[in-house]
Image: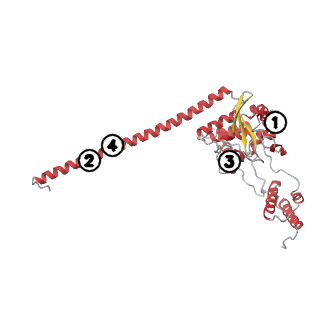
Amino acid sequence: MVPPNTSEQVEDLIGAYLTHMKEEEGLSYGYRGQALYAIEHWYNTMQRRVVFNWKYVSKFLGEVTFDNQIRAPTREEIQKMLAVLEEGRPKYDALIKTAASSGMRRKSLCTITRNDLREITAGGYTFYMIRLYNGSKKHQHICFVTPEAKAAIDLHIVANHIDSMNEPIFKFANPKNLSNALRDLQLRSGVGQEHIKKEGEKRGQARNEIPSVHGFKKFCLEAMTLAGVNIEAQKVMTDQAIGVRKHYVDYWNSPALAQKLIEEYVKAIPNLTIMSQIIAEDDRDKEIAMLKEQLEASLAAREREVAENKAARERIEAAFEKSKREREKIMATHEKILAALEKSGVKIE
């Protein structure tokens, strides 16, 4: 094959490749789009002197189609996921409630710290406003989590001794690991089914109908819509496309601007609460106190066990030392008797 000599020839070659992916291999629109993005990225970074008409090339992708029908998990399905969590592991309880009540992206979930949490009291609720991508001019924005999620986050911070203000609250090696962990919870709870690839099934198509993280965003947006939350407020709080305005409107540092979003979010709190329609503030505080008390009792019992084991070990060591000293005394007495007998001329056979 003769290498292409002009930009137009390269464009046509890329177009032929995209057409082949669609018509011959039957690959999905999303899969083809990823391939085009990778090609464009390579030419823009490695071949900077070559200029292509990417608008022309992108037409070879064809019409946007969706091979997968995805949906949000129901409240009951999220409850099932929470029900299979091991006792004493509040991390995933907090993670699920945070994702469901905020619509946060998985990368955001992996980066939030205690410095990014701000307690808000409004409409009879106490909840968190969270700053995402702190320091990024392009991506920094805010979101909110329900009182239920706030209580779960607080318990997770206490239980796992997250003392640093700059340490990620939810530690994962990378966002993909977070998705895998939530996917595993789906399978264990019966909410998701393991996908077995069928013969002839095309790549880029297989997907569970409830995405592990994006499904929570759909749940959040649907709950906000049912509660009558303003569409633009929904976009701001869930980091949807709002143009260049997010570069000029700083909700984190402007209480007056944030108040507009807070008023809208309060409308959706009943719809976004997972385990009960609403836990009253007093009941919530009692629940947190009870959980903390249980945790402290568990830690105290463990400390007592460690102390008892240490005391038992010390008693054994003391008994051993005493036995050792007694043996040394007996040996010394024996040596004295032998010396006395020898001195008196008694021979010991």
Q: Quadrant of residue 245?
A: top right
> Does residue 94 appear anywhere in the picture?
yes
Badge 2 or badge 4: first in the primary sequence: 4
* Crowd band around label 1 with a 10 angstrom C-alpha radius: few (<14), some (14–19), many (20+): some
- Amino acid type, label 2: Arg
Disc 2 secondary structure class: helix
For marks 3 and 2 on the same chain, the one whose residue lies earlier in the sequence: 3
Q: Secondary structure at mark 1?
A: helix
Q: Amino acid at mark 3?
A: Leu
Tag 3 and tag 1, C-beta contact below 8 Å: no
Q: Which residue is mark 2?
A: 327
Of labels 1 and 4, earlier in sequence is: 1
Pick whichever of labels 3 and 4 is earlier in the sequence. 3
| Image spot of residue 240 (x, y percent) | 80, 44
Q: Position of residue 255 (x, y in %)?
A: 76, 34
| Residue in front for this viewpoint, 190 or 104 | 104
Q: Residues within 10 Å of mark 2 (few under 14, many from 20)?
A: few
Q: Which mark is residue 313?
A: none
* Label 3: which secondary element: helix
The image shows residue 283 at horizontal and vertical percentages of 65, 27
Q: CA distance from mark 1 to mark 4?
A: 73 Å
Cα separation between marks 2 and 4? 12 Å
Residue under circle 3?
178
CA separation in Å, label 3 and label 4: 52 Å
What is the quadrant of the N terminus in the image?
bottom right
Q: CA distance from mark 3 to mark 1?
A: 27 Å
Q: In the image, which disc is placed on residue 225?
A: 1
Amino acid at circle 4: Ala
Kind of residue at badge 1: Thr
Please report contact status of discs 1 and 2: CB closer than 8 Å, yes or no.
no
